[in-house]
Amino acid sequence: MGHAMQAPSQPVQPIPPVTDADRAAAFPTLQEHMAHAPELNHYLLFNRLEVADADHGTGQAWEAQGWIGSDINRLWLRSEGEREDSRTESADLEVLYGRSVSPWWDVVAGVKHDFKPGASQTWGAFGVQGLAPYKFEVSATAYVGESGRFAANVEAEYELLLTNRLILQPLLELDFNGKDDPRRGVGSGLSTAEAGLRLRYEFTRQFAPYIGVVHERAFGETADLRRDEGEDAQDTRFVAGLRFWF
């Protein structure tokens, strides 16, 4: 070419500096967090569907929850129960309205119906559920029943990924009662505590068999009522089951 090519020291069209207006346009303030999908969605999770080595043969247990709604407002269904020796020992169903109050937490309110143990009864329910720091899934619900009865349930669980498919899930559940209720075998204060450790293998994210061990212990008047019925105040059992969702 006969001469050396030299790059210009400055761009032909200099990039203008970023202004506050540019930042506001790129990151607008959301009036409602997570409000990205106005259409209805749904989700159903069987967190536990298992069999166990019970005192009187084989026992079964379930814990399930599901919702239908939007990112902000949802109708929640929750159910939990146990069977032993072909008899239902405990069963309940909760129907709750939930509203998201932060990216990680919902407040819920509604009703809970206990089918077993004893005669059926209905409670008013209100509480919170969500993801606590360090990724602990937590739910805390208070219940108000007839004749000024009060109860509460607190549950926390964590998922430890050993591999992409092998997951260890510790769980702790506490039940409290405001008054003694001998007909249902519960006393006031902390009535029962259950700690579980389940190891599952996810063939897919939606389907995972698991094995585990569960320890349950009764306290105070609840423990005394169980002993009066010839039952142990504490029990350790091995479990096997399925976790699936759709």
Image (tube, rainbow, N blue to C red):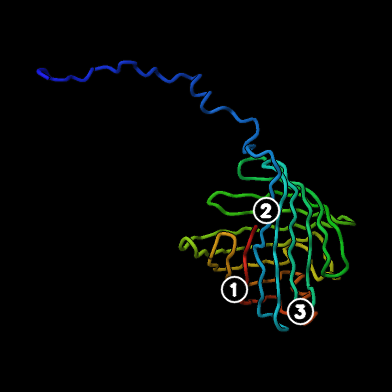
- Where residue 154 is drawn, which disc sits there? none
Contact (CB < 8 A) between labels 3 and 2?
no
State how many labels appear.
3
| Amino acid identity at mark 3 | Arg
| Quarter occupied by residue 61 | bottom right
Which residue is identified by label 1? 213
Which residue is identified by label 2? 43
Residue 124, given in percent of the width and then of the height, sits at: 83, 52
Q: Residues within 10 Å of mark 1 (few under 14, many from 20)?
A: some
Q: Quadrant of the C terminus?
A: bottom right
> Which dot, 3 or 1, sits closer to the camera?
1
Residue 180, given in percent of the width and then of the height, sits at: 82, 65
* On screen, residue 201 above or below 44: below
In three-dimensional space, the C-alpha distance between marks 3 and 2, rounded to whole angstroms, equals: 41 Å
In three-dimensional space, the C-alpha distance between marks 2 and 1, rounded to whole angstroms, equals: 27 Å
Task: State the residue at coordinates (67%, 50%).
Answer: 129
| Amino acid identity at mark 2 | Tyr
The foreground one among 27 and 100 is: 27
Task: State the residue at coordinates (80%, 77%).
Answer: 87
Which residue is identified by label 3? 227
* On screen, residue 73 above or below 17: below
Contact (CB < 8 A) between labels 3 and 1?
no
Q: Earlier in the sequence, mark 2 or mark 1?
A: 2
Q: Residues within 10 Å of mark 2 (few under 14, many from 20)?
A: few
| Quarter occupied by residue 122 | bottom right
Q: Earlier in the sequence, mark 3 or mark 1?
A: 1
